[in-house]
Image (cartoon, rainbow, N blue to C red):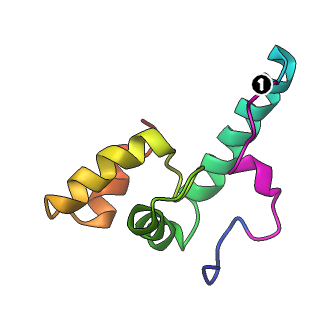
Amino acid sequence: MFLGAACTGKPTEWWFPVRDGKTSTELRVIRKNMHRAVTICETCPACSECLLYSLENHEIGIWGGIGEKSRKRARRMLKQGIGIEEIRARLMGS
């Protein structure tokens, strides 16, 4: 989808996990995989483009290294005129 994206070829479920009906062991694996996804995003050359796309299209899952709850904050920041790079800097790791 994004040229040079670091997630290309990686398991999709790392960014779009299904949590319903999972055991505690399965949930630990999901959290570990989500952490892998975010780590990959942090080094991705398409991270900002990916994040902006998700903000404009109200996507689910992890996009640009940021989960759904944090992207609600990101949308507010974007409306306030804060640039995507600054948004990433503020939200990565939160």
**Residue 69 location, x and y as percent?**
43, 39
Q: What residue is shown at x 40% (from left), y 62% (from top)?
A: 55
**Residue 1 location, x and y as percent?**
65, 79
Q: Which amino acid type is marked by label 1?
A: Leu
**Residue at which label 1 appears:** 27
Q: Quadrant of residue 40?
A: bottom right
Secondary structure category for the residue under label 1: helix
Q: What residue is shown at x 85% (from left), y 18% (from top)?
A: 23
The residue nearer to you, when weighing 22 against 78, is: 22
Residue furthest bottom as drawn: 3
The vertical placement of 50 against 64, above or below, is below
Asked if the magenta segment contains residue 19, the reply would be yes
86 horizontally vs 43: left or right:
left
Q: What residue is shown at x 66% (from left), y 39% (from top)?
A: 35
Asked if the magenta segment contains residue 33, the reply would be no
Magenta highlight: main SS: loop
Which quarter shows the C terminus? top left
Residue furthest front as drawn: 21
- Tell me the magenta residue range: 8-21
The residue nearer to you, when weighing 37 against 71, is: 71
Residue 57 seen in render = yes
13 horizontally vs 83: left or right:
right
Q: What residue is shown at x 19% (from left), y 61% (from top)?
A: 79
**Residue 27 location, x and y as percent?**
77, 24
Q: Residues within 10 Å of mark 1 (few under 14, many from 20)?
A: some
